[in-house]
Amino acid sequence: MEIKKRRAKSISYGSKRSLKDIKYIVIHFTGNKGDTAKNNADFYATGNTREAGAHFFVDKKSEIWESVPMEYTAWAVGHFYTREKGAASYYKKCTNDNSVSIELCDCKKGVSWEQMLAVRQLVQYIQKCCPNAKTIIRHWDVNGKACPEPMIGKGNLKWKHLYNKIMYNYQYRAKVTKAAAIRSSKGVKPTNKIGSINPGEVVKISKVVGAWGRLLNKKNDKWQWISLKKVKEI
């Protein structure tokens, strides 16, 4: 995973803090169509004129840009909107001071496969740096803002789908898009090639580790792995 960096203007963030004080990771969306992580990082570095910002932007092509370093408070989840329909359940619990914010770019029609994988890796990175950041929520959960709009509301299936992929590696079906090698492992690191699979075939993936998907069934008592760059969820 590569994280590119462009520091936001100082109006976008506040004072320094300890990474140990961070308890929440908040998912947002930019609300724009066709925007990229770089577009947003550039804007906050040169054009932003209000107290607003986010730590990271992730786009559909899996590019990640850091705009505000995690050791600084970003102006991302302030203000209050509504408690209607179960919103704002984390109001006054999750604040700018104890959260890291991730903005999803160009996701009005859904989060892309590559985007989801990038978010998952980014969350793992954040949790490694911030050992107490164990809770992942939406901006809507903090203060009732309709953000990320396609995923707001109690019981929202799109949110559950993304959350489960980020947190639990739940099983899903995927179609092979390019000829791919099947590799084996006794642990979690794929090593030797033990076979191949053709485009159009469908596999069941039981776990995601980095850029690799573990197939549901073992072969000769070893796990089978496929590159996630060669499959697409169905």
Image (tube, helix red, strand yellow):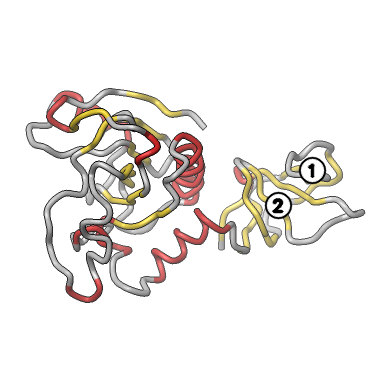
Residue at 44 percent across and 46 percent down: it is: 115
The relative height of residue 188 versus residue 18 in the rendered view (above or below) is below
Residue at 22 percent across and 76 percent down: it is: 85
For this view, does 61 lie left or right of residue 153?
right
Q: Mark 1: which secondary structure?
A: strand
The percent position of residue 7, horizontal first and vertical second, equals 26, 23
Quarter holding residue 139 = bottom left
**Which residue is at the front of the view, 101 or 42?**
101
The percent position of residue 137, horizontal first and vertical second, equals 35, 57
**Which residue is at the front of the view, 132 or 229?**
132
Mark 1 surroundings within 10 Å by alpha-carbon count, few (fewer than 14), some (14 through 19), many (20 or more): many
Considering the image in quadrants, where does the C terminus appear?
A: bottom right
The percent position of residue 113, horizontal first and vertical second, equals 49, 51
For this view, does 52 lie left or right of residue 37?
left
Residue at 27 percent across and 61 percent down: it is: 90
- Distance CA(mark 1)–CA(mark 2): 9 Å
Determine which of the numbered discs, if any, sits on residue 214 in the image. Answer: 2
**Residue, far right:** 220
The residue identified by callout 1 is 183
